[in-house]
Amino acid sequence: MEESFWTHLDALIRASELVIDRPKGFSRPHAPSVAYPLDYGYLQGTSSSDGEGIDVWRGSLPEGRLDAVVCTVDVRKRDAEIKLLLGCTTAEKHAICNFHHSAVTAAILVERST
């Protein structure tokens, strides 16, 4: 059953265009002193709990394989969602989780078993 979760996400990725709207180094809109550690965007034509496209982090590994998701919660926005991680190294995964931790937000990494 767990594998079908990942294969369904793989199908969404294959059928969608990845749009990077916040490249690595881009300043966070509500916190200009915080920069995105990796390319960040969304899958065009999809929807997440916030009504926008499913969020995606793109790492430095050339194959760009989906091997993890980050589940986030924001108590200020009263929102929770997942973000797909494509081609991320272990260090990049940790940087993404750290990016999503603050006084009002938290994240947990869920890795795909091989």
Image (cartoon, rainbow, N blue to C red):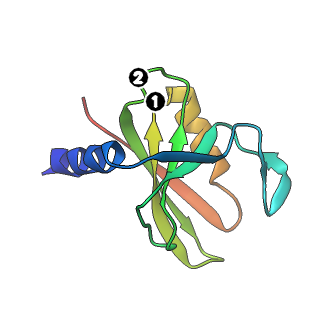
Q: Earlier in the sequence, mark 1 or mark 2?
A: 2
In the image, 17 versus 97, the foreground residue is 17
Q: Is residue 97 left or right of residue 4?
A: right
Q: Please identify the quadrant where the C terminus is shown.
A: top left
In the image, taking residue 30 as reference, residue 69 lies left or right, namely left
- Rendered location of residue 18, percent (x, y): 48, 45
Q: Is residue 30 left or right of residue 103?
A: right
Q: Secondary structure at mark 2?
A: loop
Query: Furthest residue to the left?
Result: 1
Q: Assess disc 2: are there few (<14), some (14-19) or many (≥20) residues with their C-alpha within 10 Å of its C-alpha.
A: few
Q: Quadrant of residue 92?
A: top right
Describe the element under mark 1 as helix, strand or loop: loop
Q: CA distance from mark 1 to mark 2?
A: 6 Å
Three-letter amino acid code of the residue under disc 2 = Glu
* Residue 80 against residue 62 in the figure, above or below: below
- Going by the numbered disc 1, the residue's amino acid type is Gly
| Residue indicated by mark 1 | 87
Q: Return the x and y of residue 41 as percentages of the image width and height.
A: 57, 49
Most distant residue in the top direction: 62
Q: Nearer the viewer, residue 23 or 107?
A: 23
Q: Residue at x 71, y 43 (%)?
A: 36
Residue with the mark numbered 2? 63
Tag 1 near tag 2, CB within 8 Å: yes
| Residue name at image x 47 percent, y 20 percent | 62
Circle 1: is it few (<14), some (14-19), or many (20+) Cα within 10 Å?
many
Image spot of residue 34 (x, y percent): 80, 48
Residue plotted at (46% across, 64% down): 81
Asked if residue 65 is positioned above or below residue 57 in the image, the reply reads above
